[in-house]
Every structure is written in C-alpha cells, then in structure tokens.
Image (cartoon, grey):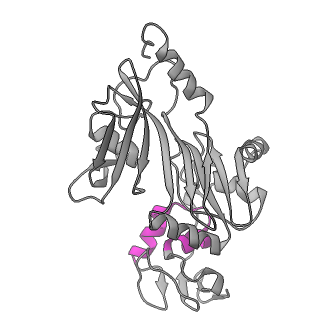
C-alpha cells in the first residue's frame, strides 16, 4: 500500500493486495485510528471519502489498486490514549486462545472494544500494546462480558468477517430476564431500528421499518420472578438481545437502558455474558467462557430462601 499526499492534510491511499476485499468502513477505521465509527459513516455519507474519485457506500468491498481519498480527521477532543499497565495485564490474562489467525478473549464487562467519546483506552488500545496487526471482527457491548474474536491481520479479518456475514459463526449468551418466561423456547423475529430518545440517548426499538433480526431464548431456570436463559442470535444487530428481550416484556436484569425495574441487590452490572463461540475458519473450533463470579453470585442469591431485595 502506498500513501500519496495531495493538498493540506488529505491522504490518497492505494489499496494493497493484502487488504483487497475489505469493507470501506473497516478500512477507514484502521486508517483513521481512534475515531468513532459514527464519524467514519458521516465522512463517507458527506462525500469527504472517495474511492477512485467517486462516492461510495460504507459497505463497499475494496479492490487491489483502488485509491481511497481520506480527509484529515482528529479524534473528538483529541483525547490522548493512555493505557494503564494494570489494564494490559488484566486483558492479557483474559486471552484464552492466540494463534496465527486470531485471538479469543473473555472480555470483562465495562471494557469497550473500540475507543469513543470520553474513553481514554479500549480493548483494541490494549492489544496494540501486546502486538501489531490486530483487527476487530465483531463487537460486544461495553457492559457485556464474554467471548470475542480478534483477527491477526487483514486476511484473517476478511475471512472471519465473511463467516460472520454468512451466519457461519455460532454465538450463545447467558442472560437473566425480568419476569417469568412463559415457554421453554421463545423466538423473537422482529426488525430492529436505531433511534434517539428525548434525551438524545441512542436506543434500539422493534419497528416494522427496521433491520431483520432473530433471537432465540431457551429457558434454563425460573428463579422467583426471573428467568435464567441462553440466548442465541441469527443476526448481529446493535443491542439485539437487549432490545428483543425488552420488546417481549422481559428486559435483561441490570440493563439501565431498556429495563426500568431495579436490579436484585447483588447485581451491579448488565446480566449478559457471551459464553459460547464456534468459529468455522480456518478449522472448526469451539470456545467456552463460564459465567463470571459476580453474575453467579446473583443467581445464588436469588435461589436462597426468600427473594433477594431490590436496590
């Protein structure tokens, strides 16, 4: 890949063979570094980014030799990335597989995969301290814990992204729902749409004009007025499990965005954990991550005689 500067701050980057087939939005995330994805989409939508001199869609697949015009961009507030040593050691301890193609991490709750407004460091910043070439393939919400795969290089990123897009990756989550699920198996096949509420906060709601989304809830245990479930998803929409659970009247415990009910006293976080991941490439592998102690304690407290008090 070669970079040619033309004009003040504008870069023209030629796509090399190793990045052919990569989506434009992911290409820009790598080139621009610590900027929110929403800014990348805005740059593309307003025509500030061009491919071979023409406007393009964020999902456009780039080809070898394409020339991408990239405007000068600064991260909001020019927040300096500062990764504490203890964060590096904490994330290092969460890596459960690291091979030539990818690494799999049992991500702690509260850690964002990529940087954003108000964050001084993210998971990808930490991985940058551990080596080079790591590429995010999918996301887990910041308050969600569990299994996340990160590609080691462009080729692996392209193959894994294709596997996710082709629904060949199997992901399962453990969740605690408010209320008693009426059936052992519940499938929610409802389109989801991103909106802004009156306060400006981003939310996802069920809407006929939204994107297709399918979530399966399998009841594991009814505990008092709660349902402990395994959730599997056929699509990977933003906040999908959280929004679908709320849409059927059983929002996730500890979800301060979609659940208005107070959480049981032991619960201090969103009760959602990605515990199962099956990858099809380069060979089929299955990974598991047990429920974190802080969530296991919530279940233990609810199982004790007399319901846990709400806070």
- Which residue appears farthest toward the top when viewing the image? 305
**Image quarter (top left, top right, bottom left or bottom right) of the C terminus:** top left
Q: Quadrant of residue 226?
A: top left
Residue 309 located within the stretch drawn in magenta: no
Q: Is residue 240 visible?
A: yes
Q: Which residues are magenta?
A: 25-46
Q: Residue 219: x percent and y percent?
A: 39, 33
Residue situated in front as seen by the camera: 5 or 289: 289
- Residue 81 visible? The answer is no
In the picture, measured across the screen, residue 245 lies left or right of residue 110, that is left
Which quarter of the rendering shows the N terminus?
A: bottom right
Q: Is residue 46 left or right of residue 271?
A: left
Measuring from the top left, give residue 215's x and y in whole percent. 36, 48
Query: On screen, 175 above or below 235?
Result: above
Queried whether the magenta region covers residue 40, the answer comes back as yes
Q: Nearer the viewer, residue 15 or 292?
A: 292
């Amino acid at each position: 890949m070669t970079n040619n500067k033309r004009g003040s701050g504008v870069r023209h980057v030629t796509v090399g063979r190793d990045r052919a087939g990569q989506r434009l939005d992911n290409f820009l995330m790598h080139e621009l570094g610590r900027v929110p994805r929403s800014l990348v989409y805005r740059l593309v939508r307003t025509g500030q980014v061009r491919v071979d001199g023409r406007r393009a869609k964020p999902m456009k697949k780039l080809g070898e030799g394409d020339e991408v015009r990239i405007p000068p961009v600064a991260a909001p507030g020019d927040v300096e990335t500062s990764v504490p040593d203890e964060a590096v050691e904490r994330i290092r301890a969460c890596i459960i597989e690291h091979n030539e193609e990818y690494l799999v991490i049992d991500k702690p709750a509260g850690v964002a995969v990529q940087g954003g407004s108000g964050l001084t460091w993210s998971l990808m910043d930490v991985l940058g301290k551990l080596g080079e070439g790591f590429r995010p393939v999918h996301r887990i919400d910041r308050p969600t814990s569990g299994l996340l795969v990160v590609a080691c290089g462009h080729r692996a990123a392209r193959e894994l992204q294709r596997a996710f897009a082709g629904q060949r990756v199997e992901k399962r989550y453990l969740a605690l729902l408010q209320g008693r699920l009426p059936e052992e198996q519940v499938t929610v096949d409802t389109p989801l749409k991103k909106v802004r509420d009156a306060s400006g906060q981003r939310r996802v709601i069920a809407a006929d004009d939204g994107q297709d989304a399918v979530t399966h809830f399998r009841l594991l245990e009814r505990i008092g007025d709660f349902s402990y479930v395994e959730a599997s998803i056929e699509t990977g929409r933003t906040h999908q499990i959280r929004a679908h659970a709320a849409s059927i009247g059983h929002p996730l415990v500890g979800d301060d965005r979609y659940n208005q009910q107070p959480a049981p006293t032991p619960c201090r976080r969103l009760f959602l954990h990605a515990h199962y991941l099956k990858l099809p490439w380069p060979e089929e592998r299955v990974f598991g991550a047990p429920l974190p102690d802080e969530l296991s304690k919530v279940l233990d407290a609810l199982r004790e005689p007399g319901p846990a008090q709400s806070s």
